[in-house]
Every structure is written in structure tokens, then in C-alpha cells.
Image (cartoon, grey):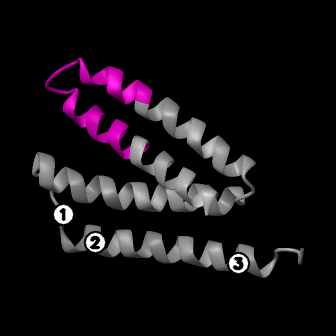
Amino acid sequence: MRKWALLLAAIFVEVTGTLSLRASQDHKAWLIVVAIGYLASFYFLALVLRAGMPVGVAYGVWGAVGTAATAALAAVIFDDPFTTPIIVGIGLIIAGVLLVELGSRHHEAPP
């Protein structure tokens, strides 16, 4: 459970950093939030790996959920497009990550 909480923290700060990158186009001060968000994200991601989550699963979930959240929030906050092809693409990314997760469980050694 701890590793999933750490992964959610990594995703949250990465999405915050990415949305701040978009905001920095209008106000350069947001670049501070970008740097802190990305550094914190990699820190939390390292903790996730140290907690024992396979790197393929951690990175896949981090990327997929981060991409989905960033696209959805950018549509709400910045009025970015959120079209049907984008939604289908996000669905395909999530499906791929689920397959990676299931595949990693299949190859785990018993305790």
C-alpha cells in the first residue's frame, strides 16, 4: 500500500510540474514550480522503486496516469483540446500499462 501512495505522490507532483510548465508561458515565475515538481516526482519515483515495485510497472503507471490527468486538467484549466482521439489514445496507454502490470505479476517469484 505504501508504494502505491508514493506512486500517487510522484504522479501528483509531476502533473503539477507539467501544468506549471504550461502556466510558465504567461508568467515565468511558474518555472520554480516546474523544477520543484519534476525533482519531487523523481524523488518519489525512486522511493517507489526502493519499496519494491517493478520499474516497468512504476514507470508505466506514472506515465499513463500522468498523461491522462495532465490532458484532462489542461482541458479544464487552459481550455486545451480533449477530443475523442485523445481519449482513445489515453485508453490505449492505460490498457498497455495494465498488461505490463499483469505480466509482472505473472513472473513474480513466490515469497
Instruction: Say which residue appears at 48% left-offset and 54% top-offset.
Output: 8
Q: Is residue 25 located in the magenta-colored stretch of the structure?
A: yes
Q: Nearer the viewer, residue 100 or 3?
A: 3
Characterize the magenta stretch by its predominant secondary structure.
helix
Label placed on residue 82 = 1
Residue lying furthest left in this view? 79
Circle 3 residue? 103
In space, the residues marked 3 and 1 are separated at their CA atoms by: 30 Å
User: Dot 2: what SS?
Assistant: helix
Segment tinted magenta in the rendering? 14-36
Q: Position of residue 58 (x, y in %)?
A: 61, 57
Q: Is residue 80 visible?
A: no
User: Dot 3: what SS?
Assistant: helix
Q: Position of residue 56 (x, y in %)?
A: 67, 60
Residue lying furthest front in this view? 2
- Asked if the residue under mark 2 is in contact with the one under mark 1, i.e. CB atoms within 8 Å, the reply is yes
In space, the residues marked 1 and 2 are separated at their CA atoms by: 7 Å
Q: Which mark is first along the chain, 2 or 1?
A: 1
Check disc 1 and give the amino acid type.
Answer: Phe
Label 3 environment density (alpha carbons within 10 Å; few <14, some 14–19, many ≥20) = few
Q: Is residue 6 located in the magenta-colored stretch of the structure?
A: no
Left or right: 26, with 57 as reference point: left
Label 2 environment density (alpha carbons within 10 Å; few <14, some 14–19, many ≥20) = some
Q: As displayed, is residue 69 above or below residue 102?
A: above
- Asked if the residue under mark 1 is in contact with the one under mark 3, i.e. CB atoms within 8 Å, the reply is no
